[in-house]
Image: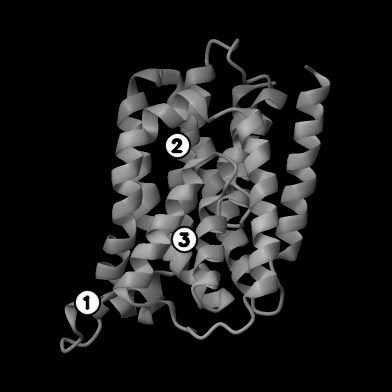
Amino acid sequence: MSDILRAVILGIVEGLTEFVPVSSTGHMILVMPLLGIDEGDPSFRFWNGAFDIFIQLGAILAVLIYFWRRLWRLTFRPADTRWHEHILVKLLVAFIPAAVIGLLASDFIEDHLKNPSVTATALVVGGVAILLIEYFVRHPRITDAATISLRLAFTIGLIQCLAMVPGTSRSGATIMGALALGLTPAAAAEFSFFLAIPTMFAAGFYSLLKHIDEIGQDQWVILAVGFVVAFLVAWVVVAAFMRFIQSHKFTVFAVYRIIFGGAVLVYLLSRT
């Protein structure tokens, strides 16, 4: 299989899974071996490091463009808006936990948690969590993501840190955490996507600097292909997802996670 085709497939996987609660990192970890990308591959560090990170930037660019009008209005609110009510302050407060814990734990996560067994287990556990939250949370009261308090923003930021475990899903953790804290599905998804912008850009550029030496001159084309594909697919998925949650629950994602994660665990156990 050519590297360009690999880049296209992985870009599609990233775009499809980054912003729905099924874990893009988990899917990348599980799909790469199917494309012949494993630790025995000389280019494994490139695909699992620089490439994986770079295409996430393409996906988050799709969110930035999709929500730009809403973000523009919220950013340039009336001058009499109190500082702690501004969306940028809330996003900064929510971003801090992931920034601190990410810096402290990034090496441990890459060395010990990015493997199929951890990923599959997290997929199943996350699926069960989605079902439980949907069952017990019945009456959300916050309909506008921009109106949440600083305390709620910080709490959602703490919950986001759970997604550092591959297979958990950043969007899944933040959306379901926000639902549990009283946001409607649309408000929870919107705040999750807003929070993804600083979180993923910061994590992406930090990790890219760490892996920059893994990129050869002939690999920039591969990065560009993955970036563009991830961007285009993510844009379509975000638009479809925001329409979907207006009238549907997250049950389908929970069932998918449990079935997919369970199947991977059965497969891994069968090989031992």
The C terminus sits in image quarter: top right
How far apart marks 1 and 3 lie (CA) works out to 24 Å
Q: Earlier in the sequence, mark 1 or mark 2?
A: 2
User: Dot 3 corresponds to which residue?
Assistant: 63
Q: Residues within 10 Å of mark 3 (few under 14, many from 20)?
A: many
Q: Earlier in the sequence, mark 1 or mark 3?
A: 3
Callout 1 touching callout 3 (CB < 8 Å): no
Q: Is residue 147 above or below residue 64?
A: below
Q: Which mark is residue 21?
A: none
Q: Is residue 81 above or below residue 151?
A: below
Residue 170 left/right relative to 263? left
Q: Position of residue 192 (x, y in %)?
A: 47, 63
User: Dot 1 corresponds to which residue?
Assistant: 84
Q: Residues within 10 Å of mark 2 (few under 14, many from 20)?
A: many
Q: Is residue 4 above or below residue 146?
A: above
Q: Quadrant of residue 145?
A: bottom left
The N terminus sits in image quarter: top right
User: Dot 2 corresponds to which residue?
Assistant: 53
How far apart marks 2 and 3 lie (CA) works out to 16 Å
* Helix, strand or loop status at disc 1: helix
Q: Quadrant of residue 54?
A: top left
